[in-house]
Structures are given as structure tokens and as C-alpha cells.
Amino acid sequence: MSLEAKKVDVAIIGGGIIGSSIAYYLAKEKRKVAIFEAQQIGGKSTSAAAGMLGAHSEYKEFKHLYPFARSSQLLYKELYEEIKELTAIDFEKKNGGLLKLAYSEEERRDMESILSLSSVEWLDCKEAREKVPQLAADIVGAAYLKEDVHITPLIACNGLSKGAQLFGTEIYEYTHVLRVEKNGMGYLLITSQGTFLADNVVIASGVWSNNFFQQLGLSHEIIPVKGECVAAINEGAPLHYSVFHDQFYIVPRNNNELIIGATKKWNDWSEEPSLDGIEEVIQKAKRMIPEVGKMKWKRAWAGLRPQTYDGYPFIGEHPEMKGLYFATGHQRNGILLAPATGKMIRDLIIGSPVEKQWVDAFKVERNFFAYREGSN
Ligand SMILES: Cc1cc2nc3c(=O)[nH]c(=O)nc-3n(C[C@H](O)[C@H](O)[C@H](O)COP(=O)(O)OP(=O)(O)OC[C@H]3O[C@@H](n4cnc5c(N)ncnc54)[C@H](O)[C@@H]3O)c2cc1C
């Protein structure tokens, strides 16, 4: 061990939205934090995301995941203002909400659980098309999810990391963490840019967290679920709401850009979009808004969602190594879940109370069968 090694309270491995949120919440509590990012902040799964905060559109399970997701959705409201004031970075929050389409009575019935929530309203076909006149005429109707607004993920990630930096966090980009080793009461991080010491380590490395599970004696696995997206230019009437069906969506961004996504390719590690994938998302989008086919092409991309076997993220301490935490496996909702994850890891580290049901549901050493099929 080098005597020169720099020491921090908390070393975070991965500067995606999850690592950046954790850094922000901990730095605000005056912890000395460092983020180690192999490439650029937010450059991986985070920058590929559409940015929907879909607590209502995404979850059928109301026991653990929906309450956690909803708490995170609510945290965004304050975080949005807080980060804007602190850093002048605007997450580009769009408040229109989301229409979850139903093409049959069966699909409508499938939404009954969310329709019982006060923040959700059922619109028949005519009412839905009043909100979005471009919608296909063969829908039965849509659940109007007012609170499922969206943001621009890379900007949010940059806002959180910038906020963390203003509270003293050190950010090491292009710094690959090669190994984490136990060192007395703390940990040694061997990186491509030298060695660091930390009292606590948080692994927030998205799909690449697998390397650390293996190194640290755990057989857990994160599976990449590749998502491919296309951006189109809408020169027609602007879209004020996101539309969603069967886990595919069209999300309006600033300057008339529509984000159209996304495929779900299990255990596919390639980060380039394929023609098949692009064709699939365009077909799905045309089913929702037929005129999409006539819009101008802008770009296409792909990202890897970090998936767990039971659909729940890992947010908790290593079963045997005190002070070593995992915050990964947020699959298709990491943007939504970032604030609640940041807050939960902060509380675990500083010893503040955390909802027991979330600690149990998301802990690393859980019984996977108890929570199987936790999410859509
Ligand atoms: C197409 C698509 C659409 C999506 N849409 C949405 C959406 O609308 N709403 C939503 O909530 N979620 C969405 N998601 C999911 C969301 O993007 C992810 O859940 C989230 O970005 C995961 O964040 P993360 O920080 O865990 O991972 P990442 O953003 O992948 O960050 C992990 C970081 O760790 C770094 N890293 C890895 N290994 C090391 C190492 N050894 N040393 C240093 N750094 C390392 C990587 O370089 C990377 O930057 C979408 C995902 C995709 C692919």
C-alpha cells in the first residue's frame, strides 16, 4: 500500500445517475466523497435513457417497488428546484405526464390497480385524442398518469454530480477501478490512476457491477438488457404528453425531438443499435402515433439496463464486509429511482433510519424467490 494514497469517507464506483445521486446526498451531509468513473459522468446507461419518471406506468407491484418509486418521484420535485438553484442546471422537467394506452378491454382491466389511485385518471378514446390528437383511432382509451413526468437524464446526472462537487465531492473521470481490497477497517481501491483509501465503498457500476460481485466473493449477477432508441424530428403539432404501450414509448423533448424506444434484448452486451431493433421501435411507435413514420430521422443509440433476476435493485451492504455497499440493478427505472437510492445509501452509511421493508426487499443477501417478478 502506498503511503501517499488519498483517503476519503466514501468512494463511489460509477458516475451514472445512481452514483451521482448517492454522492450528492452524502456530500450534503458533509461526508468526504469521491466518484470514480471509468469514462465520463453519465456516459453509459444513464445517457441512453428516455427520462420518464414512471412510478405509475412501470409498476404492478404495490408492496415495495411502487412506494419506493413513488417516494423517488416525489423527491425529484424538491431536487429539481434545489439543483437548479445550486448549480443553475435545469433537468428539463416536462410536466405533461403520460398516457398509457389500452387497445382492448383486457388491457384496460389490466390497469385497474393504477386506476384506483387518485393521481390517475381514465380517459376514453375521444378524451385521450383531445389531449393527443395524433393518437391512433383504434385505442379503447388511456390511463392518464399526471405525475409520470419526464426529465433529460444526462442533464440530471450532470446536475447531481455538479451539486455533489460544490459540496466538496472529488470526481475522477477516466479512472477505472480495477480492484477493491479490504484494508484494516476500510478499503483500498486500486485504479488506473493510482491507489485510494476509503472508509466506505459504494458499487454503483451499472451492468459492470458484476466484476465487483465476483471479486468480493458473491455469486450475484446483473444481466444487461439492451435497449435501442431512435430520435425523430416532429415538425407537426407538438406533443405535450408521453405516450406508452407495452413498455414502448414516445417521449417529447425540447426542440420538437421525440424519443422513441425501446427494445428489450436480454443478455446482449453490444452497445450499438441494430436495424432490427430500430425497425421494431418504429413499428411500435407507429401503432401509437401513425404519423411517426413520416417524421425526419435524427439519430439512434443503445444502452444496457442493469437487470436483476427478481426485478428488484440491490441497495444494501455486502453480507460480510462492513462498509461496502451495492447500489445497482435498477433495470428500466434507474433515472426514476436515483433520488430514493441516493437517500437510502446515505442513510445506511450515516446510520439514519431506513424503511425496514425496503432494506429487506433490496438487500444483497435476499431470497430471490420471495420477490420474483417484482416489476413489469
Ligand atoms: C434505452 C433505455 C431507456 C431507458 N429509459 C429510462 C427511463 O425512461 N426512465 C428510467 O427511470 N430509467 C430508464 N432507463 C434505465 C436507466 O437508464 C438505468 O437504470 C440507469 O441509468 C442506471 O444507472 P446506473 O448509474 O446504475 O448505471 P450507468 O449509467 O450505466 O452508470 C454506471 C457507471 O459505472 C461506470 N463504471 C463501470 N465499471 C466501472 C469501474 N470498474 N470503475 C469506474 N467506473 C465504472 C460506467 O462507466 C458507468 O458510467 C433506460 C435505459 C435504457 C437503456
Image (tube, rainbow, N blue to C red):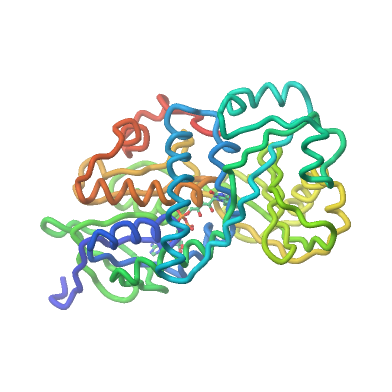
Residue found at x 31% / y 72%: 170
Residue 255 x/y as whole percent: 71, 66
Task: State left or right for residue 22 relative to residue 292.
Answer: left
Residue 216 x/y as whole percent: 28, 50
Q: Is 242 or 13 nearer to us in this picture? A: 242
Q: Does residue 370 sit above or below 29 in this rendering?
A: above
Report the quarter where the C terminus lies. top right
Residue found at x 53% / y 40%: 55
Residue found at x 86% / y 47%: 290
Report the label total. Answer: 0
Report the quarter where the N terminus lies. bottom left
Quarter of the image for residue 29 reads bottom left
Task: State left or right for residue 223 relative to residue 166.
Answer: right
Task: State left or right for residue 91 relative to residue 370.
Answer: right
Residue found at x 58% / y 24%: 116
Q: Does residue 253 sit above or below 336 in this rendering?
A: below
Q: Is 247 or 216 nearer to us in this picture? A: 247
Residue 171 x/y as whole percent: 35, 72
Residue 100 x/y as whole percent: 69, 37
